Amino acid sequence: MAKKRLSKQDKEHIRAAAANIPDLLAKETRAHTHKKVPYHSAHYQKRKKLMLFAVLILSIGLLGIWGLSMQSKFYDYKTADKTEKAMFDEARKDIGEIFATLQEQDAAKEAAAAAASSSVQAVVTSTPATSTKNISSFFSDVAAAITSTTATSTKKTSTTTVE
């Protein structure tokens, strides 16, 4: 298709119309947006009071909730120091008891091991190598002594409970 050529008069007409577009748009928008609001009418005054009342109620509610929150924070601040100190003291006491119990258990195990070691050494030095019957009976006695010592230390630890 071939382009149509416009005359100078048509081109001038198009340019003038394009230049007038912003003015026409401004005129149209002003015509639709400038409505008068009757500020002194009873309906407007009633809506204004209703909105003011709603904002006032909402503000009072928010201030009330904020006041309760602050009261709770002050209460926590006053009582937290005593409660936390008591909790730390209780934990320190419990940990001390646990370590004391563990030290008692270790001491009992070391004593049992030393007793077993000295008993084995005494048997080895006093018993001739040929009497295996005496050695096996001695080891069964040592094993019984160790289990009774372990059972005694287990009873001590099982009665100590941490609450």
Image (tube, grey):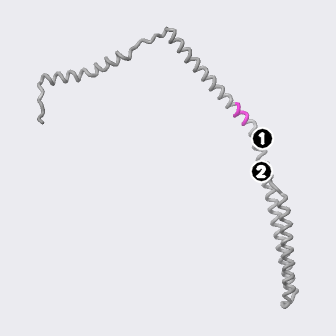
Q: How many marks?
A: 2
Is residue 45 in the magenta section? Answer: no
CA gap between label 1 and label 2 equals 14 Å
Secondary element under disc 2, as helix, strand or loop, is helix
Q: Is residue 35 above or below residue 82?
A: above
Is residue 74 in the magenta section? Answer: yes
Residue in the image at 86% along x and 74% along y: 145
Q: Which residue is denoted by mark 2 in the rendering? A: 91
Residue 7: % across, % down = 11, 25
Majority secondary structure of magenta residues? helix
Q: Which residue is denoted by mark 1 in the rendering? A: 82
Q: Earlier in the sequence, mark 1 or mark 2?
A: 1
Q: Is residue 66 left or right of residue 23?
A: right
Secondary element under disc 1, as helix, strand or loop, is helix
Q: Which quarter of the figure has residue 121?
A: bottom right
Residue in the image at 84% along x and 67% along y: 151
Residue in the image at 65% along x and 28% along y: 65
Identify which amino acid the numbered label 1 is placed on. Answer: Lys
Q: Which mark is residue 8?
A: none
Q: Is residue 24 above or below residue 162?
A: above
Is disc 1 in contact with disc 2, using a CB cutoff of under 8 Å? no
The answer to which of 35 and 125 lies nearer the viewer is 35
Identify which amino acid the numbered label 2 is placed on. Answer: Ala
Q: Which residues are magenta?
A: 71-76
The answer to which of 135 and 124 lies nearer the viewer is 135
Residue in the image at 77% along x and 50% along y: 91
Q: Can you say which quadrant of the picture contains the N terminus?
A: top left
Q: Residues within 10 Å of mark 1 (few under 14, many from 20)?
A: few
Q: Is residue 84 left or right of residue 43?
A: right
The answer to which of 43 and 60 lies nearer the viewer is 43
